[in-house]
Amino acid sequence: MNFYKYQCCGNDFIITEEHISNPEIIQRLCDRRYGIGADGLIFVKSEHEDGFRLFFYNKDGSTDTLCGNGSLCSVDYAVRFLNVEKNNFIASDGNHQFVKNHDDSYQISLNNTAKPYEILFNSADKRAALNENISKGFFVNTGSPHFVIFVEDVQKVDVKTLGRYFRYNINKLEGGCNVDFVTILDSNTLQIKTFERGVEGETLSCGTGSVASAITYAEMYNKDLNHVTINNNGGQHLVSFYRENDFYEDIKLQAKPEFVFKGEVSLV
């Protein structure tokens, strides 16, 4: 299989034009010791009428909903190697548009999102989060389900332990959720860490998590805000949006994807 390795804000992916859907093969390819190594695998298919289509798989072989960083990487791949001319792509949640900026970063559109809603911790949740002195979080779906928790210092949070707990205990009937821990740095800048389902651990950044955190911050703390800078340990996202009644619209996610290397790998 021919493949291209990409990363965006430290979130890395294998991109190929060969549709691999076997979970065991995907797990092996994404393994950082026995395979290529990645947080996920993306199959990109050129479609002249719609720009291109992408199919995203988590590193555990499961299919997920929208992947923000993966979409940004796929856009660069499609423009650079498939000569896609239409600024449009189709992901699991429908149509998206993209724009390339002068600094080689990209901006992609996300679908309208219902405003976040508050979830108060029960007694078991409070025991799990005792060391963080937190008592609630906010659920929002930005193409992928996220549970956003505001903390005093995100760098001190045990993301692995606390993230895994809420990943399985929130949105249970729909397979759980991603968990974002957020610290407010100033009026329009956040620092976040994300525990991602499918990766089952912390990633250096999460595109839909940045959007979820930005929207939740705006909803709960500053309803007049329409743009937020998100600092991840792996890089920076820019998020913009507009609020219309109970929905967030015209959502844009911006960052700079990087082509790392290409190669071929045996699937046998």
Image (cartoon, rainbow, N blue to C red):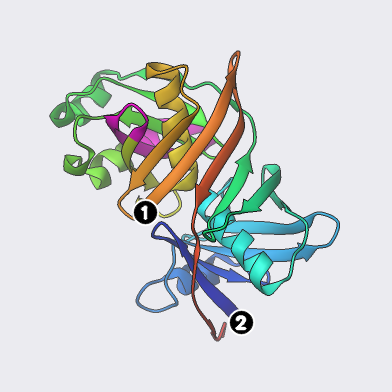
Q: Quadrant of residue 178?
A: top left
Q: Residue 114 lies in what quarter of the image? A: top right
The residue under label 1 is which amino acid type? Gly
Q: Quadrant of the N terminus?
A: bottom right
**Category of crowding for the residue at label 1, using alpha-carbon neighbours closer than 10 angstroms: few (below 14), some (14–19), many (at least 20):** some
Q: Residue at 40% across / 39% down in the picture?
A: 229
Identify the residue at image location x=37%, y=38%. 179
Q: Identify the secondary structure beneath mark 2.
A: strand
Q: Which mark is residue 235?
A: 1
Q: Residue furthest top?
A: 245
Q: Mark 2 or mark 1: which is in front? A: 1
For the residue pair 5 and 191, the one nearer the viewer reads as: 191
* Residue behind mark 2: 2
Answer left or right for 134 relative to 21.
left
Screen quadrant of the C terminus? bottom right
- Bounds of the magenta span? 166-189
Q: Looking at this view, name the residue that lies furthest to the right.
A: 49
Residue 57 in the image: above or below residue 68: below
Q: Is residue 232 visible?
A: yes
Q: Residue 131's x, y, as percent? A: 13, 31
Magenta segment: does it hold 182?
yes
Question: Where's residue 172, x and y in %?
Answer: 46, 32
x, y (%) of residue 201? 34, 52
User: Residue shown at 30%/52% (left/top)?
Assistant: 233
Image height check: is 10 above or below 94?
Answer: below
Element type at mark 1: strand
